[in-house]
Amino acid sequence: MTAWAGLTALTTLTACTLQRPTVPPTVEHDPTLPRLAAGGRLLHGQALGPQDAPVLVVLHGGPGADHRYLLGLSALADAYRVVFYDQTGSGLSPRLPAEALTVQHFVDDLDAVVQAQGGGRPVHLLGHSWGAMLATAYAGAHPDRVDRLVLAEPGFLEADTLDGLPGGGWPGWRVVLGFGRAWLAQWTVDPQGDPFARADWFLGQVFPLTQGEATHCPGSPPPLTLWRAGAPAFQATLGRMQRDPAWGRQLDFTHGLQAYSGRVLFVRGACNQAQGEAHQRRMMARFAPVNQARLETVPQAGHFMFNDQPQASLAAVRGFLAAP
């Protein structure tokens, strides 16, 4: 037996004897999952805290992540009705093909949640990363439905702030090899009849690789723990931007923002040099001076400040929401 034949046989035997990886089912296929029914939409999510308390809707990042890594914010449920949900095409919410997902679709999802949970009152929005960009777009589209905004390190808001982001450069061998291993391994995933399973599994493997060292504190890997990554949401947004940079440059999350008069808190991690203070202040200028936007820097925290320094981050949010 040649060495190549032996390696092939060993690989085949290993693939047959090891359990094939899977992804968990989404909310429409698992009746035990918590869910939000909003405006005819079904989403994986939950609402915590007193029903008569002010509503705070939490928006996860990605695009294509889910709200699992932000569940530490449930500590705010002692004073607020805290609403978490996975955006369509992400986490354990239903999947749609990438071509059916648009920024407007995500805004409409959020509006359905706000209308169902807000009881006719304006709500607070807290968005992290991509979620902060989505919260900004919603405040411009529905300014009367938003009380206060907490924006934790949005990536960009329009072409000018997109140009202000540093270039990616060569990703390095660790990232290249990680992508390669994940791409090969995705073909061992048991899709169990789910056409999105393999792409979601692949994205879940490479998500940590996309966070460069400049985004977090030295020695602290980015704590992104997901139930299930959402390839359709990623492909419809960041993936499309990579394929078509001109499309990305025409995105404008600030449209209509001049009509929003509520207060805004920007939160950043002191260790994140990829999206530093100067970049955040450029985006703050899209709100000032009418909205009294201010910036809070969390020491010893990176892009995932709510995971790195939960107590300090929660204190900043509490103080902002409770201020007269």
Image (cartoon, rainbow, N blue to C red):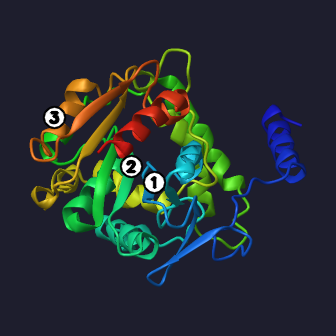
Q: Does residue 26 appear to the left or right of 301 in the view shown?
A: right
Residue that carries the numbered disc 1 in the rendered image? 58
**Mark 1 Cα-neighbour bin, 10 Å: few <14, some 14–19, many ≥20:** many
Amino acid type of the residue tagged 2 in the rendering: Gly
Image quarter (top left, top right, bottom left or bottom right) of the C terminus:
top left
Relative image position of residue 223 (x, y in whole percent): 57, 34
Tell me the residue at 37%/69% (across/down).
101
Disc assigned to residue 127: 2
Report helix, strand or loop for mark 3.
helix
Tell me the residue at 57%/48% (across/down).
74
Tell me the residue at 30%/52% (across/down).
148
Residue that carries the numbered disc 3 in the rendered image? 282
* Sequence-wise first label, 3 or 1: 1
Identify the residue at the far top of this view. 218
Report helix, strand or loop for mark 1.
strand
Residue 48 visible from this viewpoint: yes
